[in-house]
Image: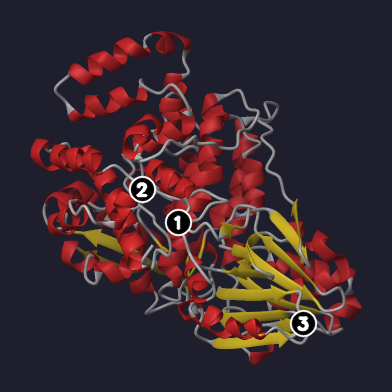
Amino acid sequence: MCGIAGIYCSNANDDFLQQIHPFTNSMAHRGKDANNFFVSTNIALGHQRLSIIDLSDNANQPMTSINGRYTIVYNGELFNYNDIKYYFSHKYPESFKQLRSYSDTEMILELFAIEGEAVFDKLNGMFSIAIWDQNEQSLVLARDPIGIKPLYFSKFDNYFCFASELKAFYEILPKTSVDDMAVAYYLHLGYIPHPFTILSQVNKFPAGHFAKVKSDNFELHQYHYFDVINNQNITYSQAREQVKQVIENAVKGTLVSDVKIGVLLSGGIDSSLVASIAAKNQTNPITAFTIEQKDKNFNEGDYARKIADFLDIEYMPLMVDYDFLTKNLENVLLKMDEPLADSSFLVTHAISQFASHYVKVALSGDGGDELFLGYGMYRWAKRLTNTAVSSLKPFASAIFKNIPSQRFNRWAQFFDIKEELHSNIYSIENNYFTSWQLKDLLNQDFQLNFSNINIDDPILKQEWFDFTYYLPDDLLVKVDRASMANTLELRPPLLSTELADLAWSIPIKYKMHGNQLKIMLKDILSDYLPRELYDRPKKGFAIPLAKWCRNELKDNITSSLTNHQSSIYNFINYNFVNSLISNFYNENIEYLAGRIWNLYILNYYLESHKL
């Protein structure tokens, strides 16, 4: 895992290319093993290296091809490293013999020199890649199909710039301004969906695409599509066996490393499955890192400990409470790199920091919920599109609003949805602002617009929304920033491209039955663990946000959000927020904590960056 950056300019020998140094150095935390640059006519590339495979200097970047034509900077790891190595050595044996290292970087580079952009769809893993063609004076960028590894870009004046993190652009942009549309999306979702960023001058590079940049031309091409096949001809046992085999192969692929590997174990289905297969296949001892919380309602440490004992792997818990998680809170929040209301960032950062003292690489269970239906949102998608329920929505909403229960009052919002069903289900489930609440919150009107897919099934549509937006723009942003801020590489084997392709071909009935979620992964996990160790309600790495906002964080929040001069009020309605704060603190409406935190994070980011 690394940090990459580049500046392309069609004006030869432009002095601005020297800005590659502060541009790259702003991401030094992403890799401290090497820091190198390539500066030539029209191009400057920078790289921060975290050495994982081939620790020698021969694998340092920027790396130039054997023929001298191409130079690469690459951030990521291949889950199919051994497959690519086998393919290269057998199809192009003479070229393979000339390799100067056994790094995945050089294999990608030299295969690109032979096959061009066709190589990208052969790569199964997490990556952002930039390759400079000295002969054509052109630049090629590519990002993995799911969007595991970040890539941002900006076009201004005569320059095209890219980097692994948004913060790097503050080093080179002549001016920065807030994208009003990004603010609206953030308030609705708690994250900023692609292609937007908080800055109008910067965009997120789309997953599964490559682009060619030459002079003023920017040509974008999609190289990988996830087809929703919903194969009804496959039996459950056949699908189960295929999924199990692909998961085992993916985990084995993520164990390729020249440094020690750990696993983040929450005690839930996904991380337990990854840990079980890793423990079975790792030749060296593996360590499980777990968060334990003093608040028993959020603690899964006892389950994680039992699982680690059963797997006979080392167990290293980190006990956290409010004081631990909020120590240097503001500095930790800045590591988010962009506004992100996902409060579990604090826990992810803490466990990453802890694990980084012992390992450079850890496996995670990210992706299981999105690919195998693990969220309660899928139940709501099913309910709200039921013909009988649809006709009763107004009555259900009125009834739930009048029941003296916060749970039912919150549920009433689901029955008020009249537009953007899937984003509003997500927003309500996570206690953010619905599309109709935005109309009162924002100082101007906005029309939310999400890419749609031609799928009839409402559960599949919700799953597609989560896979397309929530996964790459919230979860994977959180995991990347929290881990890389601590120079730790996190690998999510459940997000292998092969597994994602397979998961989208499996009928819903094999993933969800009635209200039972993620039934196939639970079934597969039973091959490795006794059910009593994992068959329980989902928790994950979460915190008691409402309790903290009411108590320990109250002064921070009220001083930030009750100040008329706060940056946030350039975009939103002060009176609406003041009413929200009153309802939360005076009426003790707990689910409003998500909205309070959402606003607090946005204001902190805007003021920290003087936006």
> Is 280 above or below relative to 145?
below
State which quadrant residue 36 falls in.
Answer: bottom right
Please give the residue where the numbered disc 3 appears in the rendered image.
Answer: 12
Q: Which x, y percent locates residue 280?
A: 51, 62
Q: In the rendered structure, which amino acid carries the disc numbered 2?
A: Phe
Secondary structure found at label 3: loop
Q: Which x, y percent locates residue 586?
A: 8, 39
**Badges 3 and 2: C-beta atoms under 8 Å apart?**
no
Q: Which x, y percent locates residue 324?
A: 20, 68
Q: In the rendered structure, which amino acid carries the disc numbered 1?
A: Val
Mark 1 vs mark 3, CA separation in Å: 32 Å
State which quadrant residue 541 falls in.
Answer: bottom left
Q: In the rendered structure, which amino acid carries the disc numbered 3?
A: Ala
> Is 54 above or below relative to 520?
below
**Circle nearer the N terminus (1, 3):** 3
Please give the residue where the numbered disc 1 appears in the rendered image.
Answer: 178
Relative to residue 54, is residue 381 drawn left or right? left
Mark 3 vs mark 2, CA separation in Å: 41 Å
Q: Nearer the viewer, residue 288 or 105?
A: 105
Relative to residue 487, is residue 246 drawn left or right? right
Q: Nearer the viewer, residue 582 or 67?
A: 582
Please give the residue where the numbered disc 2 appears in the rendered image.
Answer: 571
**Badges 2 and 1: C-beta atoms under 8 Å apart?**
yes
Q: Quadrant of the C terminus?
A: bottom left
